């Protein structure tokens, strides 16, 4: 417990140091979980560029035949929490919304990494449990609470799904049109050079940027080939990388950080 308190204090101090300066243009870099093959590299780049980011966690398969939220990766998540980044749920099983059903449930496609997809139906309460399970595991690993945000896998939602998540304490975070960085696109059609050029041209101040901690299907790795020159290029253009808690849409929601949020989100 003492180590967790120290980590929380360090996170607050680091977050204060990383705030954008008045003459800088903020963008909000976010990462969804993936196979974790590039996770150490991402962490190094964030430190090198004094960048704060937001991570959305699901329990996905990894290159080492484990899962993103198992004990192998707990130290990595602890270190990122100590650095003061923001964290949200990506659902435990990586459930992709497909449609609302007449009985109030949601038709979901469970698909993560190289695992074959399967269909299942979830009630609002069961969807809340998916979000909460990630939050509870995050607290077990890091000693701090998850922030009151989530990102639906593939960004797919409906008004009913958003209402169900909001009822148990989570607000949805998507990404800006220019913030789709393309790391999940096929590299033969979208080479790294094209993705880098497009992002440097189109990203605007205030954009939420989205990438992953490793994509199974892309042949030419997006990181570091795109991520490192993208961060350098944006820095050179006067941008800074801010945590989502500084975004005007989410600042009020996340003010005070996760310390004010109960360990488990409210049930609907």
Image (cartoon, grey):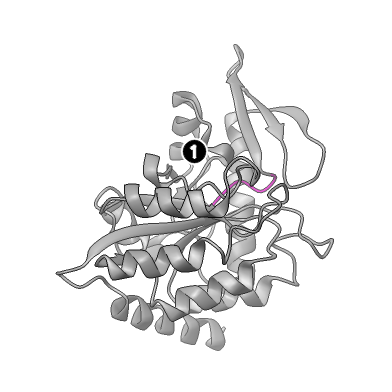
Q: Is residue 45 left or right of residue 241?
A: right
- 240 sits left or right of 114 in the view: left
Horizontal side of residue 177 vs 263, given as left or right: left
Residue drawn at the location 59% of the way across and 58% of the way down: 222
Say which element carries label 1. helix
Residue 68 rendering spot, x and y as whole percentages = 70, 61
Q: Residue at x 44, y 50 (%)?
A: 149
Residue 176 visible? The answer is: no
Q: Which residue is mark 1?
A: 165
Q: 208 or 68, which is in the foreground? A: 208
Q: Position of residue 182 (x, y in %)?
A: 53, 46
What residue is shown at x 55% (from left), y 54% (from top)? 192
Q: Residues within 10 Å of mark 1 (few under 14, many from 20)?
A: many
Region rendered in magenta: 89-93
Please state, as top left, top right, bottom left or bottom right, where the N terminus lies in the image: bottom right
Tell me if 257 is positioned left or right of 22 in this view. Answer: right
Q: Residue lying at the far top in this picture: please name it.
A: 102
**Does 121 lie within the magenta span?**
no
Name the foreground residue: 85 vs 23.
23
Q: Where does residue 155 sit, x and y in percent of width and height? A: 51, 37
User: Within the image, what quadrant is residue 108 found in?
Assistant: top right
User: 108 above or below 150?
Assistant: above
Q: Is residue 65 above or below residue 4?
A: above
């Amino acid at each position: 417990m003492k180590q967790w308190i120290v980590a929380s204090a360090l996170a607050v101090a680091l977050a204060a140091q990383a705030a954008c300066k008045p003459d800088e243009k903020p963008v909000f870099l976010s990462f969804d979980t993936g196979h974790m093959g590039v996770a150490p590299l991402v962490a190094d780049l964030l430190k090198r560029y004094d960048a704060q980011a937001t991570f959305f966690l699901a329990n996905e398969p990894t290159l080492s035949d484990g899962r993103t939220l198992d004990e192998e990766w707990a130290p990595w998540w602890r270190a990122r929490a100590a650095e003061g980044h923001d964290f949200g749920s990506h659902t435990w099983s990586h459930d992709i919304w497909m449609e609302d059903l007449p009985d109030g449930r949601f038709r979901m496609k469970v698909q993560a990494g190289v695992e074959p997809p399967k269909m299942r139906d979830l009630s609002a309460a069961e969807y809340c449990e998916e979000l909460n399970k990630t939050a509870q595991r995050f607290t077990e690993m890091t000693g701090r609470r998850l922030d009151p945000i989530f990102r639906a896998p593939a960004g797919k939602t409906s008004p009913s799904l958003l209402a169900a998540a909001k009822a148990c304490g989570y607000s949805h975070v998507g990404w800006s049109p220019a913030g789709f960085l393309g790391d999940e696109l096929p590299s033969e059609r979208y080479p790294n050079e094209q993705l880098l050029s497009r992002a440097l041209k189109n990203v605007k101040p205030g954009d939420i940027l989205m990438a992953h901690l490793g994509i199974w299907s892309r042949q030419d790795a997006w990181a570091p080939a795109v991520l490192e020159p993208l961060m350098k290029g944006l820095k050179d253009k006067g941008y800074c990388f801010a945590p989502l808690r500084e975004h005007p849409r989410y600042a009020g929601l996340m003010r005070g950080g996760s310390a004010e949020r109960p360990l488990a989100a409210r049930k609907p």
